[in-house]
Image (cartoon, rainbow, N blue to C red):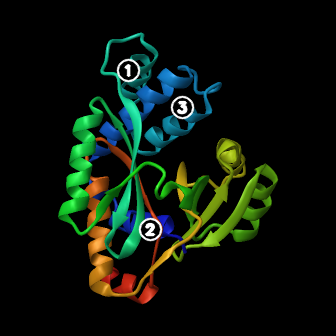
Amino acid sequence: MSGHSKWSTIKYKKGAADQARSKVFAKLIRQLEVTARDGGSDPETNPSLRTVFQKARDASMPMDTIDRAIKRGSGELEGVRYEATTYEGYAPGGVAVIAEALTDNRNRTAAEIRNLFNRNGGSMAEPGAVSWQFERKGVLELDRSLDEEKIMEVAVEAGAEDLSDSGDRWVLTSAPHDLAAVRDALVEAGVTPSSAELTLEPTTTVAVTDENEAKKVLHLLELIDDHDDVQSVHANYDIADEVLATFDA
């Protein structure tokens, strides 16, 4: 299993109780504004906006909140201009980390992310230092109770590349440009994904077998993920299932 998948699994299990809905909404609002600004305000002609729009709906964000965010992004309403930026670094044990952010002050955000790395056993890296170890993918998660054959039949025809068993979920991957088509095909077939998003999947992984080191890695990722400007965090660790089981317990 990739680092992304396991980090995603841990967050999935923790659920909304660990993250206030207002913080989730704040991150999604920024994504809506930026994708609307960069590709237009119509989800039908802007695939990136369509993906974020669906994430917002899946998070139960009110339509008027979504509409206002899109209008701010397209310039119909006044708002703060956010810029997309990426920070790269290393967690304890040499685990590669990428944090994708939307910020109105690059210098402030860079200093704060660097501080999180430095105070928690990691280090910030230069742009490009770790990004070559990741590739952009579409990732869809489905309830484990859904029929595997039906998922495969529908998803592969729509462009999915792989289906894996993540224990309590099915995880589908696709090329980035096929994500919306795969999700639409699944919904039409009555197997609605619990989530569908673009992410970075590691092409190589770093084994983390020590429980204490694993805790340090996950603690740093959680701190970065909790930063207001950070939209997503990706890492290439491979934590042994028996170590993860101690966290679940």
Tell me: residue 27, above or below residue 147.
above
Asked if residue 196 can be seen in this view, the reply is: no
Tell me: residue 86, above or below residue 213.
above
Amino acid carrying label 2: it is Thr
Marks 2 and 3 in Cβ contact (< 8 Å): no
Marks 3 and 1 in Cβ contact (< 8 Å): no
Q: Position of residue 51 (x, y in %)?
A: 55, 39
Q: What is the quadrant of the C terminus in the image?
A: bottom left
Q: Secondary structure at mark 3?
A: helix
- Residue shown at 59% from the left, 70% from the top: 145
Q: Residues within 10 Å of mark 2 (few under 14, many from 20)?
A: some
* Residue annotated with mark 1: 68
What number is the disc on residue 136?
none
Q: Work out how far the residue at label 3 is from the one at label 1, CA to CA, in angstroms.
A: 14 Å
Nearest the viewer among 138 and 63 is: 138
What number is the disc on residue 9?
2
- Quarter of the image for residue 73 reads top left
Amino acid carrying label 3: it is Leu
Q: Position of residue 182 (x, y in %)?
A: 70, 49
Q: Residues within 10 Å of mark 3 (few under 14, many from 20)?
A: many
- Indicate left or right for 52 with 93 as reference: right
Q: Secondary structure at mark 1?
A: helix
Q: Position of residue 175 (x, y in %)?
A: 69, 50
Q: Nearer the viewer, mark 3 or mark 1?
A: 3
Q: Earlier in the sequence, mark 2 or mark 3?
A: 2
What number is the disc on residue 49?
3
Amino acid carrying label 1: it is Arg
Nearest the viewer among 206 and 72 is: 206
- Indicate left or right for 195 with 126 as reference: right
